[in-house]
Image: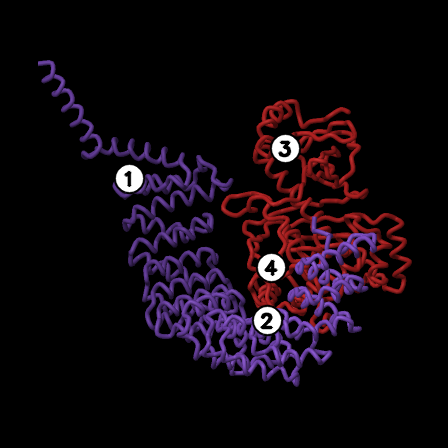
Chain colours: A red, B purple
Amino acid sequence: MRVNRFSIHSFLFCLLLSSMIFSVDDRSGQISFEGRSYPLYPETMVMPPDIPSPYLTNEGLEIMVVITKTGEYAIVPVTVENGESWLIDNKRGKGNQLKVDAKDFPYLAKTGLHSEIELQDTKRITGKSLAEITESGRPGCSSGVGFMAQEEDILSVLKGDNRFVSQMGLTHPELSRPIFHIFNLIRLHEEWERKLDIDLESVDHLLYNGVKICLSGWQSGHGWQDSIFDDEIRGYYQIDLGRELESFEKSYLMESYSHLTEDQRSEMLEKVSQLHIGEMAAFYSMRYGFYEGHTEYRADPIALAFIFRLKSIEEIDKALNGRMYKALTEFFTKNKME
Amino acid sequence: MKNFIGWIIITFYMTMTFLLAFGHENPDQLEVRISHVLHEFWSVKKGSWDLYRETFREIGDPLINPLMKKLAEKNAVPEAGREEEWNQRRVVWALGEIKTEMAVLALISIVRDETLHVWARNEAARALGHTGSEHALDSLIQVLEDKEIDPIVTRGATYGLGFLKAVKAVPMLIESLDDNHTAVRMGIVYALGQIGTDEAVDGLIQSLDDTDGYVRRMSYSYLRTLKPDKNIEFLTLSLRDKDWGVREDAIEDLVKLEDATVDILIQIIEDKKNPARWQAVRILGKIQAEKASLEIVALLKDDDWMIRNEAAVALALINTKGIIAPLIGLLSGIDKKSCESAAWILGEIRSQDAVEPLLKLLEKDDYSVIAAMALAKIGSMEAEIPLIHKLVTVDVQNRRAVAWALSKLASEYSVRPLAQALKDADREVRFWAAEGLKKIGTPEALEALMEEKKSHGEKLSFEKSNR
């Protein structure tokens, strides 16, 4: 296979640097799959690599295939793991990606889902009362947009999403993994740009479980968003992603939800296939099973399951008992969840 | 001889150097020096401007004309790509360091010059504040009066007046508190805070009605510093502010005051119309105010879930003997919400006195979940048999709570019922049963686990890790 590189100069530069850089990261600059070797990002290839995406190598390296703006392919190492702090004290590590709040939620730490009983008995999380977390998470408090709608509260949001995730036969770590993959891609992209002091080609799409996901972009502001829990999590990025519905998926939803108005159907299709999220959602979903309430930053678990094809549209709809529209749009209020 | 000649040469050289450096310069020499200094100054970044401070002050007025001519030039060092703006700011900085009356006049002309960049004009206004000049003061008041001027420049003027501690400007500052621009109002609050006279304090009190949270936050901060005798009054007032940031600041500071605030906070929580009740309970919990414990117990019946939640958490933190009897009183179950909260607190503080009433509560189906969990947290072995009886109840939440409780108590007596619960239809019940058996760890318990694993032919839910 012909391996295309940004330019001869940058190739030689990369070649010189790669041994040093990968020794820093304790990674080799290439991986093998079924007897064939492939270079790792930031090197790109003209032809798509014949390798599943995402894929876990025998050495424990998680990779994901991406497509750049110029239509070239790259294999990105995106292993979900604990690392140094993320953008705190000049560190740019991966953060505690595998940490689960086992003190407050032992069941979550062991099974990947919340225990209904533990949630019922919860009056504080990370030492903060539910009231304090809820107040801080409401729009116009610690964040302008908020972490949940005005009518929602933290416990109802945790309960509501836990039910959806459980019904879909998934776990919170399974749903946080693809967000971490994207976060790790962003981190690596920016790390390489810093190291090589060049602008790398933007990543346009991800190949994931057989679907092509559009990564419309990511951007960071000047400051950061603090966490509503008593933890070290901070948010810097706004990430936009989504995918086109395949014709059979669209037909399925159109037929199954013919009783909805056209506006409602459009709203449902939009909500299930497009996400505007921050990297906090990855840490939050893994650590607390929290995807944020119904705000514009919600990492809706139903949309995550659909976009990254963790479940088929039929499986998701069946799990939600044919109430996908309601599941995507209704707020988690105290009255509804008790 | 050689030494003598050498000494003469060294002395001559040193004298000449001294004269060149500090002696009187003729106009040509001065012009050369200014040209040299400005050339150098133009080629350094902002971080190095301070190196020229002494030189500018030493040369003084002769620098002003050449600097004003520089206003039109492009910057030699592009700072963040805004060459023109940074060029003008460079001139303003230099004039601000000269501090003579001529420099003041030059700065005033920059402030009023609409052809210049607003941030350079803003800095000129601020620089005027450091000159201590009466001219500067008057010109800054005029800027404040001029409603047509750019708000960024007005903001600079307010800061300048603050640096000057301009008592004369207070009426105008107060009059301008209705300015449409938040940045200007913040500057006014800064100035009033720096001036600090009684009249300025009145202005700050007036600004507590400002529509912007940041303005109010600054006002509260100055008022508390300027009027230390009214510190707690201002803090409790800011607790009811509609802005989250203002309230959080107040909470943080009230927590630091500890016991000094307890009586006032009790008054707040007892006043049902006071919107700061929730915040007051939160502070009382954080400072573990034993004195307020009975008043907080009363809040467990409140209509607002946030107050009930905060009261429960506060009482668990306060953890004093005095609350046990009233909490046990709430276990009668007349009011479900307060009963549940009371059971939760008694469990959290491991109250042995609560075991008997909790056992009674366990018998009531509507309350058995919370009672079972509280009893397990207390570690009451007396609860084991009643709990085992409940393990076969129809209600799944009850079975989950009982399995959870038995797994915490982990007594050998529970091995058989927990082994039975491994076959429960509910995943969570099976999980807690398995957890209990693992914790008990006797051969019989482990055998039950192995048996279930074999007969089930599939992984038990507890084996599913998050990776």
Callout 4, which amino acid? Lys
Judged from the image, the secondary structure of the residue bearing numbered disc 2 is helix
Q: CA distance from mark 4 to mark 2?
A: 18 Å
Q: CA distance from mark 3 to mark 2?
A: 50 Å
Camera-side residue: B255 or A213?
Answer: B255
Residue B8 x, y percent position in the rendering: 12, 20
The verdict on a common chain for dots 2 and 1 is yes
Q: Is residue A205 above or below residue A99?
A: above
Judged from the image, the secondary structure of the residue bearing numbered disc 4 is loop
Tag 4–tag 1 contact (CB < 8 Å):
no
- Of marks 4 and 3, the one in the foreground: 4
Q: Sequence order check: which comes first, mark 4 or mark 3? A: 3
Please count the marks in the image: 4
Label 4 marks which chain's residue? Answer: A
Q: CA distance from mark 3 to mark 1?
A: 55 Å
**On the image, numbered disc 3 is attached to which residue?**
A27
Which quarter of the figure has residue B444? bottom right
User: Which dot marks residue B55?
Assistant: 1
**On the image, numbered disc 4 is attached to which residue?**
A103
Camera-side residue: B213 or B24?
Answer: B213
Judged from the image, the secondary structure of the residue bearing numbered disc 3 is loop
Q: Residue at x 55, y 53 (%)?
A: A232
Callout 1, which amino acid? Thr
